[in-house]
Amino acid sequence: MTSIERGLWCVVPAAGRGARFGGGIPKQYLTLAGKPMLLRTIEALTAHPRIAGVMVAIAADDRHWQDVAGTKPVMTTTGGEQRADSVLAGLQAVRGKARDDDFVLVHDAARPCVRGDDIARLIEQGIPAGGALLAAPVRDTLKRSGPRQRVEVTEPREARWRALTPQLFRLGELIGALQSAIAAGISITDEAMAMERAGHRPLLVEGSESNIKVTTPDDLALAEFILARQTA
């Protein structure tokens, strides 16, 4: 069977401390609508029929993880200091469950509101394109600041997109792209950046604006509101 016929594995990097959020526990374990946010994210992923399993990269000293029971495998591996290190560890742990030419997804632990129809569209469009990411067109006016946070110039917003997740690439190609970037000492902020550096041009698949990344306490409240609307 081809990867489009088999289920796809998803890697979730969750080894971060959530320092920008503050608080006593890592951000991904904060309670969101009665459950840890990471569990909400995993449930959203495993609910999709095309996802075969989830590999979660957690910190070596993680004291908050609890095994997830369900109809699909949810496994863990030890992540690293940076996001790219954790993604790479997760991808390497998926080897043996997927072939190097199979597509895999990578999704942020702090994006619990991802919609099933966005995942479906990413898979349907991204596999024929050889790789893709969910993204949202920039709709606000962009300003570049100079000294003392004074406006230096207004940036054009045409052809500008905000990168979201999941992102979808071939397992072997993404492992190679991340290894190359890490070895070069380049700070990789998302998987598409590593693939771009390796010469790929990932497809931008428009996703819902509700697929927010929880970064601040206000984001947590907004995510609760979005989840309530999705399940109403």
Image (tube, rainbow, N blue to C red):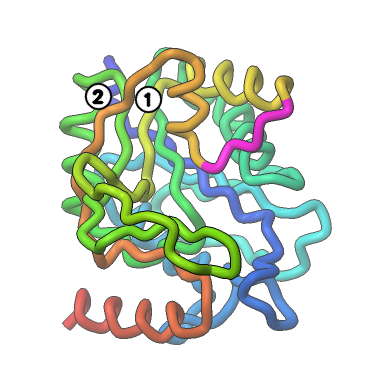
Q: Is residue 33 magenta?
A: no
Q: Pointers 2 and 1 in contact (CB under 8 A)?
A: yes
Number of numbered discs overlaid on the protein picture: 2
From the image, tell me which residue sits under label 2: 127
Residue that numbered label 1 is attached to: 103
Marks 2/1: CA distance? 7 Å
Q: Viewed as shown, does residue 180 lie left or right of 160?
A: right
Question: Tag 1, which secondary structure?
Answer: strand
Q: Is residue 36 above or below residue 113?
A: below
Against 144, residue 2 (above or below) is above
Give the residue displayed 33% in from the left and 21% down from the top.
Answer: 201
Decide which of 53, 25 is in the foreground and name it. 25
Instruction: Pinpoint residue 214: horizontal percent, then vertical percent.
Output: 47, 70
Q: Which residues are magenta?
A: 185-189
Q: Amino acid at mark 2?
A: Ile
Q: Is residue 9 above or below residue 112?
A: above
Q: Is residue 223 left or right of residue 157?
A: right
